[in-house]
Image (cartoon, helix red, strand yellow):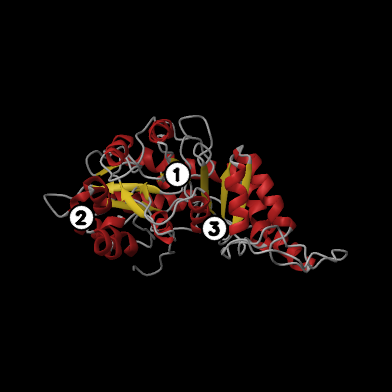
Amino acid sequence: MKANIDFIPFSRPVIGPEEEEAVLRVLRSGWLTTAGETKAFEEEFARYVESGQAVAVNSGTAALHLGLEAMGVGPGDLVVTTPYTFTASAEVIRYLGADPLFCDIQENGFNMDPEQLEQTVKHAPKTPKAVIPVHIAGEPCDMKSIMDIARRYGMKVLEDAAHSFPVKSNDGKWTGTSGHAGAYSFYANKTITTGEGGMLVTNDPDIAKRARIMRLHGIDREIWNRYTAGNTQSWRYAVVEAGYKYNMPDMAAAIGRVQLKKAGEFRSKREDIARMYTEAFSKTHGRWTLPRAPGSRFEHHAWHLYLLSVTPPGGEDGEHYRDRCIEYLSGCGIGTSVHFIPLHIMPYYRARFGFAPQDFPRALSRYQTVISLPIYPALTRHQVDRVVQAVENMP
């Protein structure tokens, strides 16, 4: 790295005095685990996304797992998802003894292709139990088409909305609320954060009830208040299932409640950065492919990630050139990442299911050329200009 260059991290959470005070309030209360803050966060989040129920958990992965479990997915079932995603989207299928069916992404995008979904379902050895569409980078999937296919084949839909809060799909609903359930992540780099945490939303009371039982050891009722004064019988509870330890503590929920109030402001700042990147990069044709064309509706995107696909010069291997660009940007003091290494080329999935790299050529091609640039509300205009200049000067 060049000397005397202030490093621009790939991601940085925006935490202010309001979040600090919220945590101190919980610490001073003497109750540190799941209680009133978590319940309030659930209610406020459900209202925000216009969902009937919200179940707070300790990660987006937990939300996905509980959602599938509550839908009845089990050993021998098939669940369709995309290979172009983080491992959590598919590993939860394996948690339940089911098998993932991958379908390729859009030819000119990053999300699940509905036509590929239909073909995957048609040629499956049996009808899949569920579908997990992933709203990659914050761009909503074509939920109208996906829901239509799911209805025709009788499949449940669990939306992986880890990247896409707060934005609406093409059916006018908040991402995560078009399907039978939706899972959000509040990991440190997400559009709002609780440090670690997640939320499952649904309009199905049976799914919500099952998720609430299974998130805390399979106990049949909320028992967070069992140590409070006056509850002489609160120590009694019944374990009705072999559940999990997925509850969200109040300190995390308190941060989430503050972040939720800032969600619109955060998204607007991310959009501003995406517009600046796109305006700058659109002036140079042929060197890269933008995540959204100039003039497209930037407001229909959460902008969790800004995915720039680079074009290798003169026949150079795409993956090798992408890696060279990342090394160059690092030398300019700019943090980047790659989203995503497709799951079908990961050792586990190749060994378990016999996938070959070319089985999903669109996902493979996108991976080989994509770079994720810094995009977060704390990024300054000066830093954005530095990123743009460095990208434009890539070899």
Q: Tag on residue 303?
A: none
**Callout 3 environment at 10 Å: few (<14), some (14 to 19), or many (20+)?**
some
The image quarter containing residue 253 is bottom right
Residue 264 position (above or below residue 217): above
Whole-number angstrom distance, CA of label 1 to CA of label 3: 17 Å
Question: As shown in the figure, which amino acid type bears the numbered disc 2?
Answer: Pro
Q: Nearer the viewer, mark 1 or mark 3?
A: 1
Between discs 1 and 3, the one toward the N terminus: 3
Count of labels shown?
3
Q: Position of residue 310 (x, y in %)?
A: 25, 48
Secondary structure beneath disc 2?
A: helix
Question: As shown in the figure, which amino acid type bears the numbered disc 3?
Answer: Pro
389 horizontally vs 181: left or right: left
The image quarter containing residue 29 is bottom right
Residue 108: in sight, yes or no?
A: no
Whole-number angstrom distance, CA of label 2 to CA of label 3: 35 Å
According to the image, label 3 marks what residue?
A: 13
Question: As shown in the figure, which amino acid type bears the numbered disc 1?
Answer: Gly
**Callout 2 environment at 10 Å: few (<14), some (14 to 19), or many (20+)?**
some
Quadrant where the N terminus lies? bottom left
Query: Is residue 306 or residue 43 the one in the foreground?
Result: 43
Report the residue at 74% width, 68% height from top: 27
According to the image, label 2 marks what residue?
A: 357
Secondary structure beneath disc 3?
A: loop
Report the residue at 56% width, 46% height from top: 266
Residue 49 position (above or below residue 232): above
Secondary structure beneath disc 1?
A: helix
According to the image, label 1 marks what residue?
A: 138
